Amino acid sequence: TRGIDRIKCDMDDVNTTITSQFGHSSQELMNLLLTGQAVSNVFDNSMVLSEDLSCHGIQSRPAIGYLSILESLRYCEVGDYYKSPLFPIWVVGSTSHFSVLFGDERCLEESKSDMLLEICRRAFKKVEGGGENGFIPVDKLNQVIDELDLKVQVGGDGGVQTLQAYLEVSGAGIILWDDFWKASSRLMTGSSLESIVSSSSLQDQDSMQVDATNTNNHDGHVDFGGPPLLITQHGEEDNNNNNHNIHNNNNNSSNNNS
């Protein structure tokens, strides 16, 4: 029903066929059967590589998901749309055949933090380089903020400029994903831009004070104001070492008295 012409337009290369060598199905055919579009990739949305080249992926959550062994081999990255389908059913592509996995509704349950992470990640990846490189040009932050509908919360264009200056890697003209996620997650949970920037300034001041204290230490070692504490894996102080030392001291005293 989609027609040959529309199927060709779905593909990254119009000369691609929906069957590959030895009659095996191509990724385009699998995507056509699962989503109704013969796109060539399994990542989310589309990726613009240049003015003349775009790679098309999955545009929305399908009814049935798809997983691939090629991802474990780092040949591709399956997007979250395929990993979180509407129903807990997944077609799994291996090196020689396809299998089907299914489960109950608990397989698709996501926490609020998981959903927030995916929203921010998709917006970040829509910018050129955000998915592959893990960073975006600083001048593209405005596009991501618009995608997340945070323009009003940060205070308009002036707030975006403040956020750009706060997140930019010094002198590099880029914003890293980790830094963006820390700030955007707080913005989307109600924190103000001023509180995010000010909290960072306080942390920098604390770091400078610690550095100054360490520098003033005459022997060049960090002085933490006492002997180190031993912590157990449960987060409790380990007194066994101290008790052992006390026991040895008592034994030494006893020997001396004898």
Image: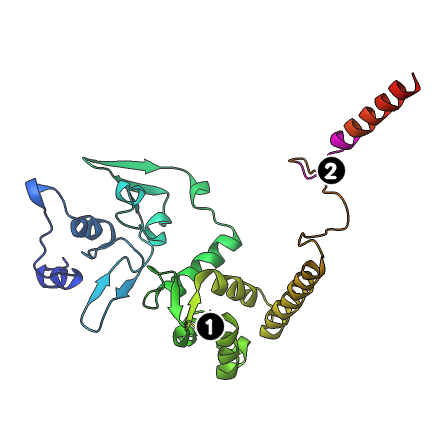
Compared across the picture, whether 90 is left or right of 247 comes to left
Circle 2 SS class: loop
Is 238 within the magenta? yes
Is 243 within the magenta? no
Compared across the picture, whether 115 is left or right of 86 comes to right
Could you say where residue 140 lies in the image, as x and y percent from the top left? 39, 74
* Foreground residue among 187 and 102: 187
| Amino acid found under the numbered disc labelled 2 | Glu
- Of label 2 and label 1, which has the lower sequence position? 1
Could you say where residue 41 lies in the image, as x and y percent from the top left? 23, 55
Compared across the picture, whether 249 is left or right of 73 comes to right
Check the image and name the residue furthest to the top.
258
In this figure, which residue is indicated by the disc labeled 2?
237
Q: Where, quadrant-wise, is the C terminus in this rendering?
A: top right
Q: Residues within 10 Å of mark 1 (few under 14, many from 20)?
A: few
Q: Quadrant of residue 121?
A: bottom left
Could you say where residue 189 lies in the image, as x and y percent from the top left? 57, 64
Q: State which region is magenta.
A: 234-242
Compared across the picture, whether 26 is left or right of 186 comes to left
Residue under the image location 46 percent in, 41 percent down: 106
Q: Where, quadrant-wise, is the N terminus in this rendering?
A: bottom left
| Amino acid found under the numbered disc labelled 1 | Asp
Check the image and name the residue furthest to the right.
257
In this figure, which residue is indicated by the disc labeled 1?
149
Q: Main secondary structure of the magenta part?
A: loop
